[in-house]
Image (cartoon, rainbow, N blue to C red):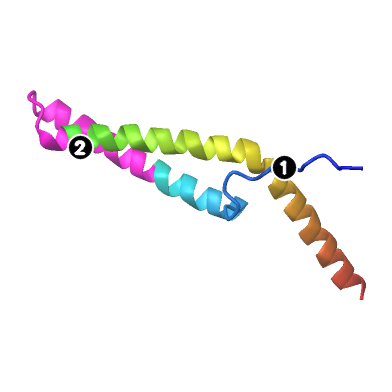
Amino acid sequence: MAQPAAPKRLQPRMTRGAFRVQFVLWSILLTLQLVVLIMNLSLLPAWDLGDYISLAIVTLTVIYLAFLLYVRHHDGLFWDEEEAARADWDRRGRAL
């Protein structure tokens, strides 16, 4: 009998730790760009190239953070399985 196919991971190399690091770094970038954008807009009434670039970076950062949350939603099951296997491996090692 054919077994049901296991769901495929979106990004096979992304672990929970990699997700956390990327999420923190992209959040910091978003925060800094928002601060720069707000400061530039409050001081200068006219938009220049830097403001448009900051706005583009903010948009791309928000999109990538949404993608990371999407990956987290779909890879959470795999991360839990990996942690359970690692905990089982540690438990067996300590039993010896």
Q: Residue at x 8, y 28 (%)?
A: 44
Where does residue 32 sit, x and y in percent of width and height?
A: 30, 41
Q: Quadrant of the C terminus?
A: bottom right
Q: CA distance from mark 1 to mark 2?
A: 37 Å
Disc with the residue nearer the chain's start (1 vs 2): 2
Q: Residue at x 56, y 35 (%)?
A: 70
**Residue pointed to by mark 2:** 53
**Residue pointed to by mark 1:** 77
Q: Residue at x 37, y 38 (%)?
A: 61
Compared with residue 92, is residue 87 higher up or lower down, i.e. above or below?
Answer: above
Compared with residue 66, is residue 20 higher up or lower down, i.e. above or below?
Answer: below
Q: Is residue 66 left or right of residue 58?
A: right
The magenta region covers 28-51
Where does residue 81 sit, x and y in percent of width and height?
A: 76, 50
Pick whichever, 7 or 53, lies toward us: 7
> Mainly helix, strand or loop, the magenta region?
helix
Where does residue 4 sit, x and y in percent of width and height?
A: 82, 39
Residue 51, image quadrant: top left
Compared with residue 45, is residue 63 higher up or lower down, i.e. above or below?
Answer: below
Where does residue 49 sit, x and y in percent of width and height?
A: 11, 35
Residue 26, image quadrant: top left
Q: Residue furthest top?
A: 45
Q: Is residue 6 left or right of residue 35?
A: right
Q: Is residue 65 left or right of residue 89?
A: left
Q: Residue at x 67, y 42 (%)?
A: 76
Q: Secondary structure at mark 1?
A: helix
Q: Residue furthest bottom?
A: 96
